């Protein structure tokens, strides 16, 4: 069996499905398959294909043998029950004894019976939890206990007895009730503030008016989750076990069931086939899915019948009977409403606070929608260097990902790509006589290797850009061979953070190694592997790690990431999502340097001076002081530590966190000449109103958040400082 590689992807992780814009879908197995556990021929073939790919094609050259099968089984248990609260140790022992030695061989034969039986046990244990929770939540609950609970049990042993397990469930549910009770206290205080001062809502409907008890809310939430479990399809069960297999090899080899596969293409191509709406759970009642915005020119907007804020009650695809979707997750709603271009979908919607009798049933024809807001954006800001009265014009390029519409390129159509969009943006910025350029790669997850190479060619004269090594030790060097052409040759600074990954790291590393510009921010993700996307599987698609990339100096970015020349406040301090935090991450190593000629050089003394100057500015900049304080406040919450189950103690702790956060916000406002908030409730009201206001704007129309813009301004000042230090 051979799967045709269609593209080389350098993305940070699997893309989520939660609704952005409805897109093309595939028909998946009906929910009844989840209880029947009868794999289809296509599912069995897909399983054999993925097992063969791992056995023969992964970069690590590790065979998919009995020992690896045991590791996959362990991963499967942990992915189903990551917090070790559902499976008993006896379940693990029994199922491992039964299937551990044969698990890999079964998958290689396309036999899903073992994984299906394990999923059935998972469903049984989950339902035991839901049933226990329902009984527990219908009784009076003591919120003034003397014990505690640890929420993060990922590294904890599984429970040996059901009694031990239920004791934990009781404590965990008690804490949820405590947290909901405290949350309701805040919500009611905020509702009262809105009633007294409606101007704080900025015209948004922000009054929750929640009259359910915390126990009722939690019961409703758990009922939704239990119903979602019952609707899990056999495709999703297959996805779970095959992803367990791929992730046992490394964190970036993934299997995508059909719905997930489409979402990955959407994220890479920036082109959708759908009705053109963005959705989210309704804030007043998550049982409902709310339409937040309409995409200009999309079918929903053109119809004139769909409105922002509409709640989706039911969906019918391709002429089928309307299906009630109240209580469904956004992922399920998205999967149901997607379909091919030119096909019809029927949605039943109503405005909030209106009776169901006022609902509107609308038939929409799906069409292609371009995600214009998702690509490269450009602007010019004015920054005055320290010790100068002469403002400088600084260009800013914001690059959300290294995207490429592969399908359109293959078919010979006009297509979008990050290098084309960047070339156009740089041409416009050059016309504006900018004094320097900031390239913002914060939160950029990566994308196409070809695109990052083309991007670098716009900034670097010529020479090697990145080295790629395959599992046989062969090294390929991507070169810029345009005879020294540079579309932009001026001063340059690149901003990165912990969420900058893969292709972003290649770009930043090359700029740093050539001395072409400065890299500022915080150490990047450390994702230094390349995946082949395989889209010829019987069902869905997969990414398989087959190469590793290296800087032109010979060192990998894998695990270590790119360390910035100048450190800025790390807004992700303590967050565990970098490569260094992942299970089965591949190791850092080195290969030979590829000969290259640096275009510039920043000496250690220069970098030390720039760091010192920036650190001084950060300690007095209200935005950086605020962000640094938030890091310290976040350290007060740690799911790995015991949490008291006494509501009075939790309330006191929460008040302390709120007070410190309010003090940080008011210190920032005072430093900026703004009026401090009188209370935590007023502060939260302002944050909520701002969020609602921004959520209804297009991405490129939203004003820059000051705490985010501070990084751009500081990066520009560092670049201007460096320019002064270079001058004789």
Image: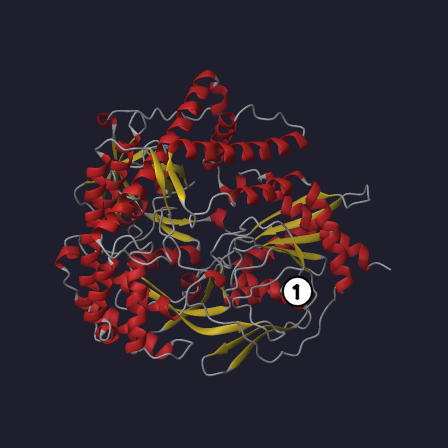
Protein image colouring? secondary structure
Is residue 684 depicted above or below 701 in this figure? Answer: above
Image quadrant in which the N terminus is located: bottom left
Is residue 176 depicted above or below 10 in this figure? Answer: above
Residue at image position (69%, 64%) is: 516
Image location (x, y in percent) of residue 174 = 31, 38
Task: Report the label total.
Answer: 1
Residue at image position (74%, 60%) is: 607
Compared across the picture, whether 238 is left or right of 533 comes to left
Is residue 688 visible to the viewer in this orientation of the structure? yes
Query: How dense is the environment of label 1, judged by Cα within 10 Å: few (below 14), some, or many (20 and up)?
Result: many
Is residue 343 visible to the viewer in this orientation of the structure? no
Compared across the picture, whether 326 is left or right of 401 comes to left
Image location (x, y in percent) of residue 362 = 26, 36
Compared across the picture, whether 703 is left or right of 654 comes to right
Disc 1 is placed on an element classified as: helix
Q: Which residue is outermost to the front?
A: 146
Q: Which residue is outermost to the top?
A: 196
Residue at image position (36%, 68%) is: 248
Image location (x, y in percent) of residue 387 = 82, 44
Q: Nearer the viewer, residue 494 or 347?
A: 494
Q: Nearer the viewer, residue 219 or 159?
A: 159
Residue beneath disc 1: 512
Residue at image position (72%, 45%) is: 617
Q: Which residue is outermost to the left?
A: 36
Question: What is the quadrant of residue 87 in the picture?
Answer: bottom left
Q: Nearer the viewer, residue 137 or 319?
A: 137
Compared across the picture, whether 543 is left or right of 577 comes to left
Is residue 467 depicted above or below 333 in this figure? Answer: below
Image location (x, y in percent) of residue 218 = 28, 36
Is residue 206 depicted above or below 96 in this figure? Answer: above
């Amino acid at each position: 069996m051979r799967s045709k590689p269609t593209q080389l992807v350098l993305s940070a992780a699997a893309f989520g499905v939660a609704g952005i814009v409805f897109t093309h879908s595939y028909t998946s197995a009906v929910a009844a398959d989840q209880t029947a556990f009868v794999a289809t021929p296509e599912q069995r073939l897909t399983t054999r294909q993925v097992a063969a790919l791992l056995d023969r094609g992964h970069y690590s050259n590790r065979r998919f043998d009995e020992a690896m099968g045991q590791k996959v089984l362990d991963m499967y248990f942990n992915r189903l029950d990551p917090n070790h609260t559902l499976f008993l140790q006896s379940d693990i022992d029994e199922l491992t004894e039964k299937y551990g030695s044969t698990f890999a061989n079964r998958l290689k034969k396309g036999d899903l019976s073992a994984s299906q039986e394990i999923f059935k046990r998972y469903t049984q244990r989950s339902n035991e939890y839901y049933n226990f929770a329902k009984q527990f939540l219908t009784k009076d609950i003591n919120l003034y206990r003397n014990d505690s609970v640890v929420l993060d049990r990922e590294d904890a042993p599984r429970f040996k007895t059901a009694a031990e397990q239920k004791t934990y469930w009781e404590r965990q549910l008690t804490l949820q009730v405590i947290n909901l009770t405290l949350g309701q206290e805040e919500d009611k205080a905020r509702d009262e503030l809105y009633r007294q001062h409606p101007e704080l809502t900025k015209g948004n409907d922000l009054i929750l008016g929640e009259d359910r008890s915390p126990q009722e809310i939690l019961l409703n939430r758990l009922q939704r989750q239990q119903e979602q479990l019952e609707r899990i399809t056999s495709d999703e069960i297959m996805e779970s076990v095959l992803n367990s297999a791929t992730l046992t090899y490394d964190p970036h080899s993934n299997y995508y069931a059909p719905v997930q596969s489409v979402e990955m293409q959407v994220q890479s191509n920036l082109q959708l086939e759908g009705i053109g709406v963005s959705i989210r759970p309704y804030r007043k009642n998550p049982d409902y899915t709310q339409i937040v915005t309409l995409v200009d020119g999309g079918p929903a907007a053109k119809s004139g019948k769909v409105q922002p804020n509409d709640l989706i009650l039911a969906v019918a695809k391709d002429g089928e009977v309307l299906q009630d979707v109240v209580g469904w997750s956004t992922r399920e709603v998205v999967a149901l409403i997607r379909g091919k271009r030119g096909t019809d979908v029927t949605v039943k919607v109503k405005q909030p606070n209106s009776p169901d009798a006022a609902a509107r049933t609308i038939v929409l024809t799906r069409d292609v929608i371009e995600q214009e807001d998702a690509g490269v954006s450009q602007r010019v800001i004015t920054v005055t260097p320290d010790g100068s009265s002469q403002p400088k014009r600084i260009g800013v390029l914001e690059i959300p990902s290294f995207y490429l519409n592969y399908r359109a390129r293959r078919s010979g159509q006009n297509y979008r790509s990050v290098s084309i969009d960047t070339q156009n943006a740089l041409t416009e910025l050059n016309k504006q006589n900018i004094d320097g350029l900031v390239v913002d790669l914060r939160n950029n997850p990566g994308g196409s290797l070809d695109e990052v190479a083309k991007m670098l060619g716009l900034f670097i004269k010529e020479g090697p850009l990145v080295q790629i090594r395959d599992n046989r030790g062969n090294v390929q060097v991507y070169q810029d061979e345009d005879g020294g052409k540079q579309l932009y040759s001026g001063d340059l600074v690149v901003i990165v953070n912990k969420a900058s990954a893969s292709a972003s790291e290649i770009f930043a590393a090359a700029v740093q190694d050539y001395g072409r510009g400065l890299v500022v921010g915080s150490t990047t993700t450390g994702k230094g592997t390349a995946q082949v996307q395989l889209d010829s599987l019987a069902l869905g698609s997969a990414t398989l790690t087959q190469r590793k990339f290296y800087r032109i100096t010979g060192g990998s970015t894998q695990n270590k990431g790119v360390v910035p020349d100048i450190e800025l406040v790390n807004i992700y301090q303590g967050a565990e999502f970098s490569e260094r935090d992942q299970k089965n991450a591949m190791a850092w190593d080195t290969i030979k340097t590829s000969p290259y000629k640096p275009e510039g050089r920043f000496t250690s003394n220069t970098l030390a001076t720039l760091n010192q100057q920036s650190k001084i500015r950060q300690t007095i900049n209200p935005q950086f002081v605020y962000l640094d304080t938030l890091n310290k406040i976040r350290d007060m919450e740690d799911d790995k530590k015991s949490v008291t189950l006494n509501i009075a103690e939790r309330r006191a702790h929460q008040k302390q966190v709120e007070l410190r956060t309010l003090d940080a916000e008011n210190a920032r406002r005072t430093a900026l000449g703004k009026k401090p908030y009188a209370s935590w409730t007023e502060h939260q009201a302002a944050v909520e109103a701002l969020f609602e206001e921004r959520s209804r704007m297009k991405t490129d129309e939203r004003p820059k958040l000051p705490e985010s813009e501070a990084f751009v301004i500081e990066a520009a000042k560092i670049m201007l400082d460096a320019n002064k230090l270079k001058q004789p």
